[in-house]
Amino acid sequence: MLKLGYKASSEQFGATDLLGYSVIAEECGFDSVVLSDHFQPWRHSGGHAPFCFGMMCAIAVRTERVEIGTSVVTPTFRYHPAIVAQAVATVAQLAPGRVWLGVGTGEAMNEKPLGVTWPETSERFARLKEAVELIQRLWSEERVTYQGTYYSLEVATIYERPSLAIPLLIAASGPAAARLAGRRANGFICTSGKGVDLYTDTLLPAVRSGADQAGRDFDQLELAIEMKVSFDRDLKRAMEETRHWAALGLTPEEKTEVEDPVEMERRADALCAERAASRWIVSTDVDEHVERVLEYVKMGFTHLIFHSPDADQARFLRLYGDEVLPALRAKGGRLLQAASGKGAQ
């Protein structure tokens, strides 16, 4: 089944607004509300960073149907992975069967301000592997003792474990993390707008390879992607809205080590309009927009999480719910089935 979700952007909106938008998303027919987790936002001017787990609890008690997930939490530096396991298990008690955890290796801007020495990629990945194992054990076992390279536990128990399993998804921008998702997780998350070959030739094959190595069924994994979309009846407005997220147009080399939102904002504002909007599907025509989104369903993605830069999120949610979601549901299910059948051959 194709899922259509809403990205509740903690970097752009405060807690009260995000809660209201999440309720509207459910009313408008979205299947999930997916929260980012930032200690600092991408922009200093007009930026926000409400606490992710507090927001998840609030959304859990104000909604009835939508899934609630993260894209993504870093369970390795400012959070001990056991605390992440406890926090998400608590949310799952409030919304049984509706909660999942997405995890990744993190960004310097969220960790270094807390005095963290930011390590090389290899250590960040090794920490993530340990954290995933530790969280999964705490969710399924009692009195867990664990001794890893980076983390340890001594007869630890999560007492608020829900009866229903909590899915764990791993974010990846390269093959190593994608393979780990295939081996150990319930699914995989990435972001759109990086070139078709990255998804079809690198990331999705790596997830499948990891699943095959572990004797797991690739077709049972959730393949989620944050879809960067700026949909509006006014093309000029749709283009201008992407300026808040111009940092997405920076290369990894230009932004990976940046720890100060003021500096990230300066670099982003120096980009030309075309580069600032380069990661976004910017469009005004429903049919054209749907066709561009469906390219990701053809690749095999099963959960599309729509991230809009619009300052008026309520307007976006209602417009998208009325005009885009019905068309996507009408066409997307058939395409997903076709993509799954092709992948199984």
Image: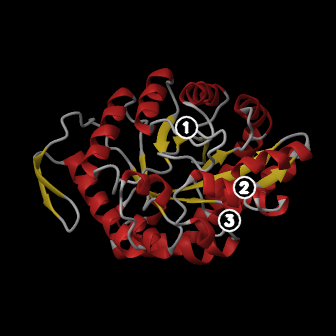
- Identify the residue shown where x is 49% and y is 21%: 62
Q: Earlier in the sequence, mark 1 or mark 3?
A: 1
Which x, y percent locates residue 224?
55, 55
Left or right of residue 235, residue 228 in this image: left
Nearer to us in this view, 79 or 179: 79
User: Of discs 1 and 2, which sits in the foreground?
Assistant: 2
Q: CA distance from mark 3 to mark 2?
A: 7 Å
- Badge 3: few (under 14), some or many (20 or more) residues near its Cα, within 10 Å? some
> Is residue 240 found left or right of 180 in the rendered image?
right
Reply above or below: 271 against 29.
Answer: below
Disc 1 or disc 3, which is closer to the eye? Answer: 3
Where residue 246 appears, as percent x and y from the top left, is 72, 55
Mark 1, residues whose alpha carbon is within 10 Å: few (<14), some, or many (≥20)?
many
- The correct choice, above or below, for 125 with respect to 158 in the image is below
Q: Which residue is mark 1?
A: 33
In the drawing, does residue 210 fall left or right of residue 201?
A: left
Q: Quadrant of residue 190?
A: bottom right
The kind of secondary structure element at disc 2 is helix
Residue density around tag 2, few if under 14, some if 14–19, many if 20 or more, within 10 Å: many
Q: Report helix, strand or loop for mark 1.
A: strand
In the rendered image, which residue does mark 3 sit on?
250
CB under 8 Å between callouts 3 and 2? yes
Measured Cα–Cα span from mark 1 to mark 2 = 23 Å
Compared across the picture, whether 199 is left or right of 326 comes to: left
- 24 or 237: which is nearer to us? 237
The quadrant of the rendering that contains the C terminus is bottom right
Give, as a three-letter code, the residue at label 3: Leu
Q: Decide which of 219, 303 is in the foreground and name it.
A: 303
Tell me, for residue 246, which label it has, or none: 2
Q: Position of residue 147 (x, y in %)?
A: 14, 63
The local secondary structure at tag 3 comes to loop
